[in-house]
Image (spheres, rainbow, N blue to C red):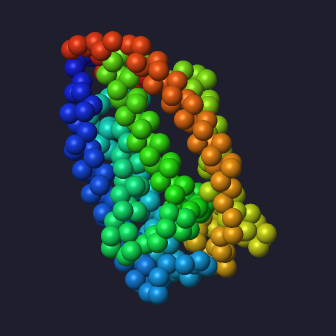
Amino acid sequence: MKGTERTWYTLLPWMTVYAIAMALLESAVVVDLRALYFPQGFRFPLVPIERTIAITELFRELATMVMLLAPGAMVTRRALDRFAWFLFCFGVWDIFYYVFLKVILGWPVTLFDWDILFLVPVPWVGPVLAPCIVALGMVLFGLLVLEARRRDPAAHILAWERALLAIAVVVMLYTFVEEPLGHALQAREQTLSVAASGDALGALHDYVPARFTWPVFLVGAGLAAAAMLNMALRSLRHRVVPNSMVLEGDD
């Protein structure tokens, strides 16, 4: 089945508003949790959290991922475009999550304040600046792909670009989980089984972040930037195809 796709920038305002609204909901939940467990302000080590609330938090994070996937799935049937919209919404959501926490709680005080970023499948920890850099990269990558597809509906990510991006993701992910995972293993905590049991934060009950491997993280960010730069240069070589007819389906 063939049909015309709406241009990405006509969808951009609503996608942005949706992601920002989700960020406000996310920050509201965190404000409530911090009032309950950290009335004197968020800090490490983390206080014990009831099992029911920990399980609820895990499922809330999974539900958030579904909600970030949904907008792209509703506006296009093309897999790469859906992925691009997911990354764009994820990045905007993550950035404005910290914006709202700053407005409501005055936190983070600086971009180098430590935060627990994610719980699935193991806890992720890092300075606020690091996930903000990743989120900005997600936004730029999503827009880059969408614009490339507007210029050339058959545009795709080259195999070596995919490989470079995959390596970049693994490298940056390592910096978020390396220290908390190492702490859990040294304490003979089985992080994966703890997370599966619904008490992912239990692995960090006496953990205080000491270092973040910025050089490794920046290597990963640089690899991603190199792949994105090449994608942008390739895209600029294509003329925009007016009223292009595109195949609705997976790439």
Instruction: Please report the residue visible at 76 percent of the width from the left and 66 percent of the height from the top.
Output: 185
Give the quarter of the image for residue 99.
bottom left
Numbered-mark total: 0
Evaluate whether residue 16 shows in this view. Answer: yes
Q: Position of residue 112 (x, y in %)?
A: 55, 64
Give the quarter of the image for residue 6.
top left
Left or right? Give the position of 32 relative to 200: left
Q: Position of residue 54 (x, y in %)?
A: 50, 72
Give the quarter of the image for residue 194.
bottom right
Locate the N terminus and report the quarter of the image it occupies. top left
Above or below, 199 against 129 in this view is below
Above or below, 26 against 242 in this view is below
Q: Position of residue 171 (x, y in %)?
A: 66, 45
Instruction: Please report the residue visible at 40 percent of the width from the left and 30 percent of the height from the top.
Output: 144
Above or below, 197 against 22 in this view is below
Instruction: Please report the residue visible at 27 percent of the width from the left and 44 percent of the height from the top.
Output: 15
The foreground one among 21 and 209 is 209
Locate the C terminus and report the quarter of the image it occupies. top left
Above or below, 36 against 233 in this view is below
Q: Position of residue 244 (x, y in %)?
A: 25, 13
Instruction: Please report the residue visible at 65 percent of the width from the left and 54 percent of the height from the top.
Output: 214
